Amino acid sequence: MAGTKKTAAGKTAAKSRSAAKAAPSRLKKPANAWPVALPACVSVAMDENIAVLTLNRPEKRNALSDDLVLGMQAFFSTIPAHVQGVVVHGAGDNFCAGLDLNELKETTTAESFETSVIGQRLNDTVQFCKVPVIAVLHGAVIGGGLELAAATHIRIAEKTAYYALPEGTRGIFLGSGGSVRLPRLIGAATVIDMMLSGRVYEAQEAHELLRLTQYLVEPDEGLAKGIALAKRIARNAPLANFAVIQSIPRIIEQDPQTGLFTEMLMVGVAQGDEEAKRRLRDFLERKADKVRRA
């Protein structure tokens, strides 16, 4: 049929876009190797004090193989002191299309438990990472990919992103913490509907109706937005950033009185930091800007 085949020029352009996402020219490989060896399906580049982690299986839509999950676990478990933020994105045209089902088709019950264990451990490590983690979402964000995104602290969606939880149609179940995190983000009824019916949400619909993402940008603008936002956050007092990402997820799980007590403790921790005291003095002495409209 006419219009169904790509021209040679179109194929070349598509390959160029994929290559640009896989290895952005603005990024530099770390001057020193990462503290631990990482598999080829995980690549790391630096932009000043921000680490950009790339899921690097574009030919598989960055589906989560065991190697990819364990590689990300190694990365998030060994972040050096000079890194003050992480931006996660996917090579090629997709963020992550979920679990690599080729690795699941013949698994035993015990092996499926192990797959769930390593997925849950990874996403726990992401959520309670020592620095803020920003996900840049484009193309497919499906199943385990959406579970990974839900564990990050800030989500930026390009308008090409789309979301699905097709577990019901595949005869499987969320296994990497998504059944805990996603209902808290978008509501239990929405998660049940997505899993049972296979409903797909487009980027704008999920952003406006579900509040799944905090930022929505044009195609190919997500990585630059993520890095700029990470750099802005990195200018905060490091202990304040740590307090926010460690305490807020725990406080919302506590009963109100316990949450208030935790909040009181974090006030003392954050305000007792020498960097926080310096910043407060700068504000009172008018060396720091007041909050203004964007």
Image (cartoon, helix red, strand yellow):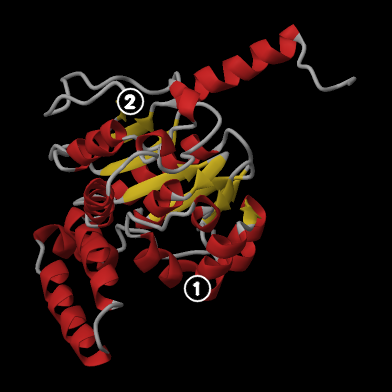
Name the residue: 43% across, 64% down: 182
| Residue 70: image location, x then y, percent | 23, 37
Q: Secondary structure at mark 1?
A: loop
Between 230 and 121, which is closer to the camera in this rendering?
121
Q: Residue furthest right?
A: 2
Q: List the single residue furthest toward the bottom.
A: 257
- State which quadrant residue 99 falls in: top left
Locate residue 219 relative to residue 119 in the image: left or right: right
Q: Between 213 and 117, which is closer to the camera in this rendering?
A: 117
Instruction: Determine whether 110 is above or below 32 in the image.
Output: below
Q: x%, y% of residue 77? A: 15, 43
Which comes before the other along the chain, label 2 or label 1? Answer: 2
* Residue 243 left/right relative to 12: left
Q: Amino acid at mark 1?
A: Gly
Tell me the crowding category of disc 1: few under 14, some 14 to 19, or many 20 or more residues within 10 angstroms, Cα based.
few
Mark 2 Cα-neighbour bin, 10 Å: few <14, some 14–19, many ≥20? some
Q: Which mark is residue 41?
A: 2
Looking at the rendered structure, the kind of residue marked 2 is: Cys
Residue that label 1 marks: 187
* Residue positioned most to the top: 8
Measuring 30% from the left and 33% from the top, which residue is drawn there? 68
* Quadrant assignment, res 104: top left
Q: What is the secondary structure assignment of the residue under circle 2?
A: loop
Q: Is residue 261 above or below residue 284?
A: below
Q: In the image, which disc is placed on residue 175?
A: none
Q: Using the rendered view, name the quadrant where residue 275 is placed.
A: bottom left
How far separated are the C-alphas under marks 2 and 1?
Answer: 33 Å
Q: Position of residue 183 (x, y in %)?
A: 44, 70
